[in-house]
Every structure is written in structure tokens, then in C-alpha cells.
Amino acid sequence: MARAIIDKSILFLVAIVMVIVVAGSVMFSSLRTDPVDDAISEDRIINIALILEKNGKPATTEILMYYPANARAALLDIPSETGLIIKSLNRVDRIDALYDPRSPKPYLEEIQRLTGAIIDWYLILDENSLSALADLLDGISVFQPNRVSTVVDDAPVALPSGFVVLDGRKTLVYASWQDPEAPDSELISRRQSLLQAVIRRIGERTTFIMRDDVYPSVHARFKTNLKNESLKRLLAEFARLDTDRIVLQRLTGAYRSVEGKMLLFPHYDGELVKDIVKQSLNALLNADATAIADKVFTIEILNGTSVRGLAQKTAEIFQSFGYEVVSVGNAGQTDIDKTSVIDRYGDKASATTVANVIRCKIVEDEAVPSTSPADFVIVLGKDFNGRNCVD
């Protein structure tokens, strides 16, 4: 009888040990799971904050929204001077007032609230790291529309016009130089183009980067919340990313002075940037999305109402979504009831996507008198309230 009791006790102990071993194996396996690999294999949209840091503050912050299933992406610029009511500081201030180079978490949490997008990971490059990475990659190829001549550290630096390969030193010039007579949007476009070029170059040099004797140097350039192997997997994925078709978008707003600081307050209390993110994510999920197009569509906006400045304000909305507004003006009359989008490009689906930005229901393919080469003409009517068309 005693022998039977002992046997049952041994079996019970063995069962407990097996349960512990299995549970431990499952936990160990889960700890080894790579989050980047999981997101890619599950075809989930990945949102990555790309930050170029200067003097301990973000010179630029771009949200890369990437969909692995079709290798398409959009890049959204968040200006450092964006003005918000920052609850944790109990004041109105620039969004970068929250930035701490040792831990960007509070800063990125505020960007998440602003955009409505969950930021999965971040990659930060300071000036030294950006310069070193450019040299490690044997230069970054960009298009420079006009020749730049400036002085850095008492030494002259020149960037010729056209396509140019930038070494580390010239990369920093390209990222920071600004024509005093050019609008701020030109600097934003240059920095977006630079990050686009960095991503492209990483993709082109993937085989080289992944070498055991090279990758540690690449990894050391980034400050990130990704572990070593996860970052390696993400950088390898850049080889698939269709960089030539990244849609460049930006947060827009109105500048106001607050306690001596010029702050950029987002249009429509931040609802516009949330709409940009929603439309971008929805378009990325569709492999045939016309919103993520192979070209940047051009738009002409005509004001068919008596509201002054309506066309210019509408232009800012479409520029935020990545469209190129080539002309704004007045329509032939000021009492047009309904807003319409005229398709001059011959693509009804793309015209509908343009119309959806302002919830316009009328899309036509009739010719309208215009000297503009725009793909689409938007004629604003009295149903347009400055953001959307309403019944």
C-alpha cells in the first residue's frame, strides 16, 4: 500500500516538473520573439519615429508609416516648434520642450496624442552619428536644385546643383542650411528628402551593412528602443521599402507668439493632422491605393465664394496631404453653391481621393478654362466651410 502511495507522489512530482519545463520553454521562446519580424510577418503597419537631433533637441522629427505587405510608406513631418497645451508641464509651449535626449518617451507620447498614431519604435541620429553613417555608407545621394555655398567651422563648403553624393560633412550642411529668402517649407522638404535618401542608401547597402565586421558600427550610430537583432531586421527591411514612392506630408498650422516664442499651432486644433494620418494608413493598407500614388499630383484651387483667402487656406490643407498646389485664384463667379473637383488627369479614382480630402462629393471630368498645368482643379463652393464640404 505504501509503495502505491510513493509511486503516485513521484508521478505527481514528475508532472509538476514537466509543467514547469514546458512553461519555461514557452516563456523563453516568447522572450526570443522579434517584434519587428512579428510585425512584418503579420503584415501590420509599422510606425517609426525618425529623429535628427541637434544640440540635444530634435532638428526634425518624421513619422515613417510603413506597410510591409506592399512595401509602401508615407513620411509625416512634425515641426519642433509645434505649439500645444502640454498638460504635464501645465503650460502652452513648443512640443520639443518635452524632449530629453536620454529618454524621448514623453516627447513621443505627445506626438502620439497629436497624430493619433501609435509609434512602435524610434531611431535617433545626432549630428556626429549622421555624419559618420553617411561616410560609412560611402555617401548619400540627393538632388540639390540650386548651388549652395557656405562656410562651416571657418572652412568653405559648396554643394553643386543637380544630383550629388554627400559625404558626412556635406550631409550636415544639406540638413541644416537654409536660404534666408526661402520659406520654411523648403527646409522641411530638404530634411524629408535627406531621410528618404538615407533609407534608400541603407537598403542599397544592406549586404555590406549586415556583415559581422560592419553592423556593430552601424548599430552604434543609432539611439533606439529596438534591441540589436530587431534593429538589424528593420534595417534589412529597408531594402524592400519603395523609397522612390514615399509620400511626403507635413503638419501645417498658423504661427502665433506666446511669451516671446513663435509657436506653430496645428490647423483645426490638430484634427487636420489626425485626418492626414488616418487617410495615409487607410491608403497604405490598400495595395492599389491611389492616395499612395506613383507621382505627386498637382492641384489648382479656385475660390467660387466671397470668402477672402479661402483658396490659400485650402491650399495648405492639400499641401499637408502631400499634394503640390501649383496655383490658387478666384473662379469666374463668387456664388457657386457646390464644391467640385475637375479631373484633368484622366484618373477618376485619383480624383475621388483628392475630393475625399475635403469630403467633396462632386467629381467631374469637364474641361475648365485654366492656364495652369494642374492634374486636378478644385472649385470651392458655398458648401465648403474651410475644412470640409457640408450639406
Image (spheres, rainbow, N blue to C red):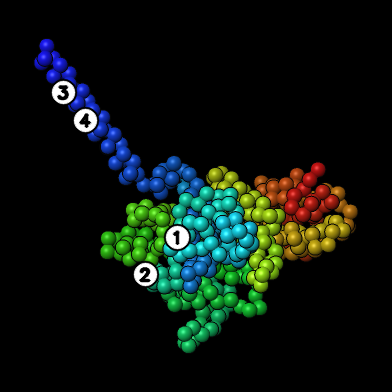
Q: Nearer the viewer, residue 38 or 344?
A: 38
N-term-proximal mark, 4 vs 1: 4
Which quadrant of the rendered structure holds the N terminus? top left
Question: In the image, residue 70 lies at what x, y percent?
Answer: 49, 47
Instruction: Give the residue pinned by disc 3.
Output: 10
Q: From the viewer's perspective, is the residue at label 2 or at label 4 nearer?
A: 4
**205 displayed left or right of 87:** left
| Mark 1 → mark 3, Cα distance in angstroms | 52 Å
Instruction: Give the residue pinned by disc 1.
Output: 103
Instruction: Give the residue pinned by disc 4.
Output: 17
Which quadrant of the rendered structure holds the C terminus? top right
Q: What amino acid type should be assigned to the residue bearing mark 4?
A: Val
| Mark 2 → mark 1, Cα distance in angstroms | 26 Å
Q: What amino acid type should be assigned to the residue bearing mark 3?
A: Ile
**266 displayed left or right of 133:** right
Q: Are marks 4 and 1 in contact (CB under 8 Å)?
A: no
Question: In the image, residue 302 lies at what x, y percent?
Answer: 79, 59
N-term-proximal mark, 2 vs 1: 1
Q: Are marks 2 and 4 in contact (CB under 8 Å)?
A: no
Q: What amino acid type should be assigned to the residue bearing mark 1?
A: Ser
Instruction: Give the residue pinned by disc 2.
Output: 136
N-term-proximal mark, 2 vs 4: 4
